Amino acid sequence: MVWDVCNWRDMGPLIRLETTLRGDGYLSILPDHLHAFIVHSDGLGQSQQDNATPHASRVATKWLQEHSSDFRHFHWPCKSPEMKIIGDIRDALLHTVENISPPSRTPMDLWTVLKDEWCRLPPRYLQTLVESMPHRVAALLRAREGPTRY
């Protein structure tokens, strides 16, 4: 399992998780990886994450509130998985990994391939995904926060 972040210009860190991510584990990622990436490299000072259990945990919510002067955090609409551009990125990575020959044989081989491919994603791909957000939001509003066809 991995944790990842991106912005308009760059892919942020790809973090390998040894176990299922829970609130306390996510709390250890926030200052060193999310905060550092958003505040120091993005310049926009904005973050959005889905409503996954660790993201919505009390400890993570409290941390985000305590750091609200550093960057703006947008709340994620309920029942809206199609809003996740990171899902599109993960699908692209999965497609690339599945087509590598010879296939990765060990977890460490797979991790190496994932990190390499993560860094190779072109900035224009990220920009296209970010530019798709107004269309995704409009579809979500038309569906009254229900499932969309986007």
Image (tube, rainbow, N blue to C red):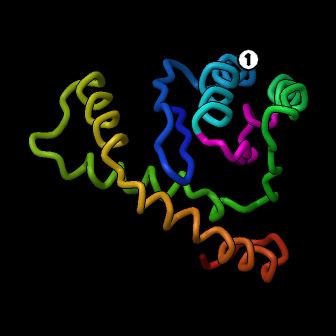
Q: Nearer the viewer, residue 12 or 137?
A: 12
Q: Which residue is mark 1?
A: 24
Q: Secondary structure at mark 1?
A: helix
Quadrant where the C terminus sits is: bottom right
Dominant secondary structure (helix, strand or loop) of the stretch shown in magenta: loop
Name the image quarter holding residue 125: bottom left
Name the image quarter holding residue 58: top right
Please state the horizontal and vertical placement of residue 139, each as a whole percent of the image.
Answer: 71, 79
Region of the chain picked out in magenta, as a range: 42-56
Magenta stretch: includes residue 99: no
As drawn, is 106 to the left or to the right of 142?
A: left
Magenta stretch: includes residue 54: yes
Name the image quarter holding residue 29: top right
Mark 1 belongs to which amino acid?
Asp
The answer to whether residue 1 is seen in the rendering is no
Image point (16%, 39%), residue name: 103
